[in-house]
Image: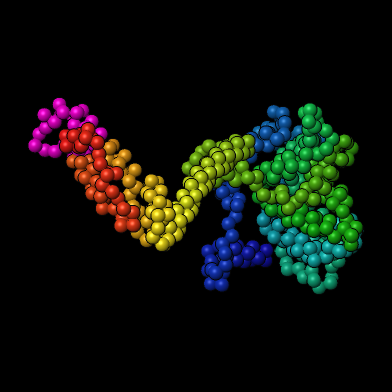
Amino acid sequence: MPHQKLSALIDAICNFVICNDSSLRSQPVIFNPDFFVEKLRHEKPEVFTELVVSNITRLIDLPGTELAQLMGEVDLKLPGGAGPASGFFRSLMSLKRKEKEVIFGSPLTEEGIAQIYQLIEYLHKNLRVEGLFRVPGNSVRQQILRDALNNGTDIDLESGEFHSNDVATLLKMFLGELPEPLLTHKHFHVHLKIADLMQFDDKGNKTNVPDKERQIEALQLLFLILPPPNRNLLKLLLDLLYQTAKKQDKNKMSAYNLALMFAPHVLWPKNVTANDLQENITKLNNGMAFMIKHSQKLFKAPAYIRECARLHYLGSRTQASKDDLDLTASCHTRSFQLARSQKRNRVDSCSQQEETQQRTEEALRELFQHVHNMPESAKKKQLIKQFNKHSGTQTPGREPATPRVQKRVRSRSFSGLIKRKVLGNQMMSEKKNECPTPESVAFGELKRASKENMNLLFSGSPAVMVTPTRLKLPEGKKEGKKA
């Protein structure tokens, strides 16, 4: 029966992913930000573990032995002598139970989680029961429920046959009979180190205030290297306990009270007592309460792990740490902001100049139009002469007229340029071939441009009378032009 439910769940997920259902095709596609993280974990577990552990050691000071235990390279050394050797017969019994498809006392599997999820789903609907997870239920009803789960039969928890305390106690019983704690033996010492992460004062001295940000980051990393079944069940369990603590005004179960109930099943090594743990009991209980309070943040991969996994699949093999990524991001942001501000300043200055010039020209045109509309008088002639002396005056309703002063300067410059061209290129002109050179083409263009400018100058606007006496050139300039 559990196999049928699991296959139905897989089919539903596959149908959603490949969008066989036409009703889902119009829905927006939700991108999983941890997609590359999960891909790297499944396809290259060794690379993924090395990446995560290297960042854990950046946050936590792990001696060589404890680091080797975390990596599974040496035998575990746990309080009270607990470990694989002491739990040999327990492991043997769990293997036999697994062969019989019994979920209680067997190693954690996805099929077992699918069965236990019925209990979790039912408890989510009954969080207001006072003393939930603290008050024991009826042992007879619990045994009936336990046998039904082991046999894989369907259970109707809504029938009223079972009480919420029966279901809650059975969930704790399932966790307590696992061969190892939900957070595994290998992670035990790391959790003790995480509990010791404290803030530092301005002088660099360690304080007694927990560094919550670093603790959350370390737990995020540590949960990434949990076995997938353990991580999945832990997420379901912490979410249930988080919702239970939110209803503490009804059920009288705070996060710390729940931690006292579940820390022995989630964190404590198997076959140890409170005397074996001694001063570590407080750390473990506080650590469990911390995980319940911040459970909504603990199952997201840190941003730098996401970036490293993404770069791994996009062609870059550079595995940057958090500090490197922060530095790169800040440098890119700073340079981008600087370039953007410089570009904005240039655009603003140019637009300001254009606006000023446009307003000036409009004002001059209006003034010239006003003078032009005046009746004929000596005052009007005098004002027109004054306009003619300035190079920026334009006749309204016509194309901008070329100022006389600029044209005289331009004609002089053209004639001087022609002289320099003639005198400077005299030796080269003697060696010319029949094919024109760029110098000869430039000389011809300049000469034609000079003539065109002079013609434009003599064909002035009728509103502005041009007198020949003002355009007479000195004798020396005439000779230069003839040359």
Q: Residue at point 31% right, 53% down?
A: 465
Viewport quadrant of the N terminus: bottom right
Q: Residue at point 18% right, 31% down?
A: 422
Q: Residue furthest top?
A: 427
Q: Is residue 357 in the magenta section? A: no
Q: Residue at point 40% right, 55% down?
A: 378
Q: Position of residue 163 (x, y in %)?
A: 86, 66
Q: Residue at point 69% right, 50% down?
A: 299
Q: Nearer the viewer, residue 335 or 142?
A: 335
Classify 432 as above or below 228. above
Q: How many marks?
A: 0
Q: Is residue 421 in the magenta section? A: yes
Q: Is residue 147 visible?
A: no
Q: Quadrant of residue 269?
A: top right
Classify 251 as above or below 409. below
Q: Is residue 378 visible?
A: yes
Q: Residue furthest front?
A: 378
Viewport quadrant of the C terminus: top left
* Residue 402 in the figure: left or right of residue 316: left
Q: Quadrant of residue 167?
A: bottom right
Give the dominant element type of the magenta stretch: helix, strand or loop.
Answer: helix
Q: Position of residue 13 (x, y in %)?
A: 59, 63
Q: Position of residue 92 (x, y in %)?
A: 73, 46
Q: How is the image coloured?
A: rainbow
Q: Position of residue 256 (x, y in %)?
A: 86, 49
Span colored in magenta: 415-443
Q: Nearer the viewer, residue 467 or 46?
A: 467
Q: Residue furthest left?
A: 434
